[in-house]
Amino acid sequence: MRIAPATWQDEAAFYDAARPFWYPVARSVDVSTGSTKATTLLGEDLVIWRTADGQAAVADNLCAHRGTMLSGGTVTASGNLQCPYHGWEYDTAGICRRIPQRPEGTPIPTKARVASYPVKEQAGLIWTCLAGEDGAVRDVPECPYFEDEDWYFHVGTPSEWECQASRMVENFLDVSHFGIVHPDTFGNPEVEIVEPYDVSTAADMLSIDAKVPYLAQDPWGEPEPGHTMATVQVDYQYKCELPFTAWIQGLTAGEGYMLYISASPVTANRTTVFWAFGTPSSLAVSDDEIERREQAVFEPDRVIVEGQRPEWLPLDLTAELQMRFDALGVAFRKALEHHGFPRIAFLRKPTN
């Protein structure tokens, strides 16, 4: 079977389908007061800045005057973003408020503005929606327990994956690779059979739930005599918030934990993975330890996903073999297609 490359029409359809959703573009801690940060979302260059009163703003990273990257500029005392080339100043709504080369009081052209986007800060992340708040299909996906004072969350270091966001999320939802890809962390190589599990999809196909039983290795638990690592029976609770946010809840050292991820599509084939790991405050785990353990899980997954072909997740369910234990991934693919994400074309060899 040969795989036809995605066309520009496929890419345009992907961006159109993805546009009316909220995505994280930075960790809140990475955009300090008075600072700027450049990023890319769905192929569009953006600038993020934070005003003196702590308000985060997101706009196109392109001055209306001479196409200069605004992220190289500075934030004024009044909270405006000043272009590094000619000093034009833009407020958080993208409207130019000052052109230094014109006398004070001279009207500013109405076209002197850049597109700005709504901002919400949630789960320790800065989120935006390129379709605008009124054009959003849904609100920012929730992160359970994040505001619970009895829980502690570490918002992890984002990582860059050279893959489509949907490929990354399906990997996160895949329940049959644990003991093969993750034997050094939570995966139990002695458990091969995937126990039956049920998947439920919301009527609007914006969320997917499943509970998956698994005898996991417990990296924070105490091994029993004669064993190299502790194990714990877990009913992993999965939830996927369309299109590219998901979380898994389980047990570690006898206590609950929450791993929350949001795959932010930089382009149709490149993704920034934002994540947060939460535990009850009674389970004392350092940020460094969380980073080390979670990156040990993410890294082998990244290697696998970046090598998958086709690069685009096939939404045509006949394109690949679908097993009963793939139920979460199948539900995810169906939901993506329901929301307008494009199929890719397969060029099949004739069979004798």
Image (cartoon, rainbow, N blue to C red):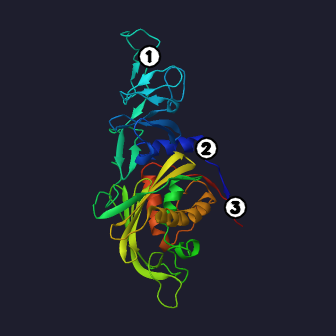
Q: Nearer the viewer, residue 24 or 172?
A: 24
> Regarding mark 2 in the picture, which secondary structure is present there?
loop
The tag earlier along the polypeptide, 2 or 1, is: 2
The residue where tag 3 is placed is 350
Q: Quadrant of the N terminus?
A: bottom right
* Local crowd size for mark 3, using a 10 Å CA cut-off: few (<14), some (14–19), many (≥20): few
Report x, y in % for residue 271.
Answer: 53, 50
CA distance separating discs 2 and 1: 42 Å
Q: Determine the residue located farthest toward the right in the rendered image.
A: 352
> From what the image shows, is residue 177 above or below residue 1?
below
CA distance separating discs 2 and 3: 23 Å
The amino acid type, in three-letter code, at marker 3 is Pro
The residue where tag 2 is placed is 7
* Local crowd size for mark 2, using a 10 Å CA cut-off: few (<14), some (14–19), many (≥20): few
Q: Determine the residue located farthest toward the left in the rendered image.
A: 149
The tag earlier along the polypeptide, 1 or 3, is: 1
Report x, y in % for residue 120.
Answer: 35, 44
The dot on residue 223 is none
The tag earlier along the polypeptide, 2 or 3, is: 2
Number of numbered labels in the structure image: 3
The amino acid type, in three-letter code, at marker 1 is Ile
The residue where tag 1 is placed is 99
Quadrant of the rendered structure where residue 127 is? top left
Q: Quadrant of the C terminus?
A: bottom right
> Regarding mark 3 in the picture, which secondary structure is present there?
loop
* Front: mark 1 or 3: 1
Report x, y in % for residue 228.
Answer: 54, 84
